[in-house]
Amino acid sequence: MSDYDFDAVVVGAGAVGLACGYALSRRGFTVAVLERDLAIGQGVSSRNSEVIHGGLYYPTGSLKARLCVTGRRALYAFCDAHHVHYYRCGKLVVATDAVELERLEGILAQARTNDVEGMARLTRAEALALEPELACVGALISPESGVFESHAYMLALQGEIEAAGGAVVLATPFEGATPREGGGFEVRAGGADPTTFACRWLVTAPGLSAQAVAATIEGFPAAQIPKGHFGKGVYFRLAGKAPFARLIYPPPIPGALGTHYRRDLGGQGVFGPDLAFVDAPDYSVDPARAGEFYRYVRKFWPGLPDGALAPDYAGVRPKLHGPGQPQPDFRLDGADIHGLPGLVALFGVESPGLTSSLAIGEEVAARLGV
């Protein structure tokens, strides 16, 4: 009989943590997912665009390139099987001047290298035939991009973990872990009823607190904990009829995909996020940011009426780069990096982490050797 309370403990019940728990549960292992909040998906996973990304931009050979495409395909199938609402609306990457038009060529080449299905160039006339209110000189179309109900997705993951005999334990912060002789970890959990329990494998996927969590694991070398940065993005909601059926994206900006448009599943238009680096998570939305949004959005939608944008919400992304630095890949660090067998520590899982989540779970299971 095993002396482990659980085969695996996952820290963080956002989309990625739940997907890791799901991947291990599917293999017949008992899993406990620890979440410090009172509900699942209250961090990064609740404050994003709910976009299913095609996988266009990410560098050849990167985890983002591979896991986004694989994860997107798996995500649509999972949503079908679990009756999670989504809309495969497609996406236009638009150029509003000659410089951006040249950039589309590189994006198209990278998307094809990444095996993104259905990518094509559109002339201005072809783009306007699809979206008549658009202003552009050319565009790319990504028909596999979409939007979905991310919280319903996370509830379905939770249900699968629990149906397999696992547990998603809320209001239970992870407070640290100690490697055990002979393998595995002794995990300390807080909350109203603090406890300790033993597990064979430990996966940390706590989003914004990834660095702080790693620092509480005995033997985790401080030099292998990457510096984290908080990338804040705000959203504005459109009053009135949504102008476009498809996602509308300008070419990416340094460090992010840029302020884009989506029509949410309720039929309303939403713009965002922008990017500002902050010292600590901050979810306020300054109404004065609207001025920059009007200027930016009118480049591709000159018909945006005055007074039509209202502050909506803000998200904070767990970045591994600061202002002016190149955007790195996901970090899914195993024993080859930190020297602790049975531990995979995730860092910097921002966009396209939600789209990639099922594939990230599979990758984590593979790195645990199961």
Image (spheres, rainbow, N blue to C red):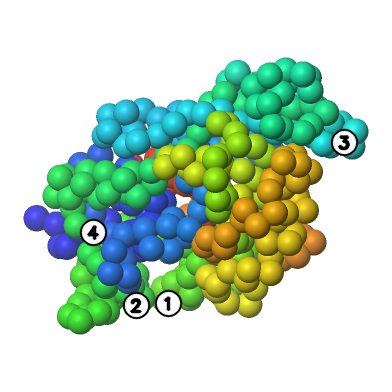
The reply, left or right, for residue 312 in relation to residue 26 is right
Q: Nearer the viewer, residue 247 or 370?
A: 247
Q: Residue furthest right?
A: 98
Taking depth in this image into account, of 186 and 77 the one nearest to the observer is 77
The secondary element bearing badge 4 is classed as strand
Three-letter code, disc 1: Thr
CA distance for labels 4 and 3: 49 Å
Between the residue at mark 1 and the residue at mark 2, the CA separation in whole angstroms equals 7 Å
Q: Which residue is mark 4?
A: 168
Residue 247 quadrant: top right
Label for residue 175? Answer: 2
Foreground tag (2 vs 3): 3
Q: Quadrant of the C terminus?
A: top left
Instruction: Name the kind of residue labelled 2 in the image.
Output: Glu
Residue at coordinates 58% horizontally, 69% vertically from top-left? 285
Q: Point out the tag, 3 or 1, that comes first from the N-terminus.
A: 3
Say few, some or many: other residues with alpha carbon within 10 Å of mark 4 (under 14 / 14 to 19 / 20 or more).
many
Tell me the CA gap for discs 4 and 1. 21 Å
How crowded is the residue under tag 2: few (<14 C-alpha within 10 Å), some, or many (20+)?
A: some
